[in-house]
Amino acid sequence: MRKKTLAFKLNFSVSLLILLIFSVGIYSVIMINKTQEFSYDTGTNWLPGVKAIAEISENFGNITRRHALILGELAIKSDKIKIEKNIKVLNNFSDEIEKEFNNIKKYLGTNEEKVAFDNILKSWKKVKDFIKTDLELAQSGKIKESWVGFNENTIPAFFNTTDAIDNLGDINTKGSINSTKNGEYFTSLTNFVILITGSIAVVISFIFLGIIKKSTSAIEHVLEDLKSQSVATSEIATSLKSSSDALSSAVSNQAAAVHETTAAINEITSMVNRTVENVNHSTNVAKSASKQAEEGQTIMKKLVHAMETIQESSDQLQNISEIIKQISTKTVVINDIVSKTELLSLNASIESARAGEYGKGFAVVAEEVGKLAKISGKSAQEIQNLITKSEEQVNVILDHTKERVENGKNVTEQAQKSFIQISQNILDLSNVVGQIADASREQEIGVKQISTAMGNINKATQTSQVSVNTTTDTAKSLVTESEKLRVNTTEVEHLIAGN
């Protein structure tokens, strides 16, 4: 205990004293409650039971006397009205006993009481039966038999019932006495415990005063040391305040420079972001142009294929020209046949003229054949003219078509080569733009890292600023608290040692 602090000693002593008082209080409350339980048990169970048994015993005695009186009146043949009045009183006593029996049931707490009460009920039932038998015999004129039954049966039953009632009364009386004794015991025990506790509290109080007395001298020495330390602490706090003010000014300048640098980096970050956006847009445009160039190249391939198809059509047109020439040749043959047919028709006409009458029919046929030959010749000539004209037009169209197809094919091939070159250039441009985009992203990442680093520096500077401000405030508070410590030390010294 010597090595323990004053606060521990005081707290321990006070806590022990409080615990002791609290324990005694709790114990006293418990004992008082216990005593009240015994008092309540005595007042609500035992004493009402004793009272109820006394009333039962009184009513039972009245029944005994009233029954004997009625039998005597019946024996001497007394006034009938008086006898009926006594019988009515007897019944009232019996009803009162029944009520008391119902009332006493709620006070029966122990098995012993319940057994005794059951014995009373059994004896009471016999008594009622014997009384009824005696009255019936006496009222029927059998006075002697009724008195014999009264002496031999009813009176012993009365005694047994009285003994049973007395037994239950003794049980309740003993229970009330024991309950009262228990309450008295707990009251005495509580008084004894309170006395012992008071003595212990007095001893603890003396120990508590001794601890305070021993600690007072030590506190005086500590106060002297505190006064010296408060002066030294005040000087240190003043020096710390001056250093904190200078450091606060330097940190403020550093914070301003970091803030300006952060603003410049944010502006660079914004420019890099715009560059990245433009590069991304250029990349999208290059991809779109590359896609369109590929589509143009596909279209040029289709155009070349179409020109080749046109050339094939020109070749087919050349075949048509050859067919027209063949038709023209066949037309010459037809003209030759027509000339020969006209000549044959003329010869037939001459021969039919020589034949005279016999050759007239043949002359008509020859004439018709000649007409047909002339018509065929005319038609063949017209066909020849149309074929010649068509051949000339086909040749002209064929020449123009060949020339245009050749020119179109040349232009298409040149355009296809140009589209291929454009597609390659766009692909190269897309690659270059992609490289620029990658470089811009790396630049953006680098700028963000620099910005993050500057943000961390800024936070650190702000933290330093807060720390410096806190240190300054702490130094000011330390100066103030040092002065308060000096004043409080003086006051405590006056409080302990006096003036």
Image (spheres, helix red, strand yellow):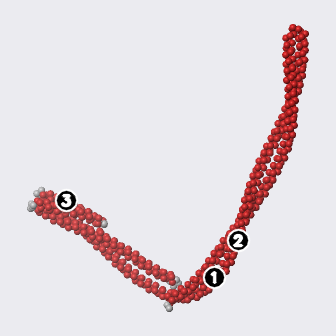
Q: Amino acid at mark 3?
A: Asp
What secondary structure is marked by label 3?
Answer: helix
Q: Amino acid at mark 2?
A: Glu
The residue mark sitting in front, 2 or 1, is 2
Residue nearest the observer in this picture, 340 or 247: 340
What secondary structure is marked by label 2?
Answer: helix
Q: Which callout, 2 or 3, points at the residue further toward the start of the chain?
A: 3
Residue 432 occupies quadrant: bottom right
Residue 101: percent from the left, percent from the top?
Answer: 25, 63
Determine the CA span between mark 2 and mark 3: 121 Å
Say which residue appears at 87% left-offset and 27% top-offset.
384
Instruction: Give above or below for 435 relative to 169.
Output: above
Residue nearest the observer in this picture, 436 or 32: 436
Q: Is residue 21 visible?
A: yes
Say which residue appears at 82% left-offset and 47% top-offset.
416
What label does residue 241 carry, if any?
1
Residue 28 occupies quadrant: bottom left
Say which residue appears at 88% left-offset and 18% top-offset.
341
Question: Which residue is at the far top?
Answer: 357
Q: Which residue is mark 2?
A: 260
Residue nearest the observer in this picture, 224 or 157: 224
What label does residue 129 carry, if any?
3
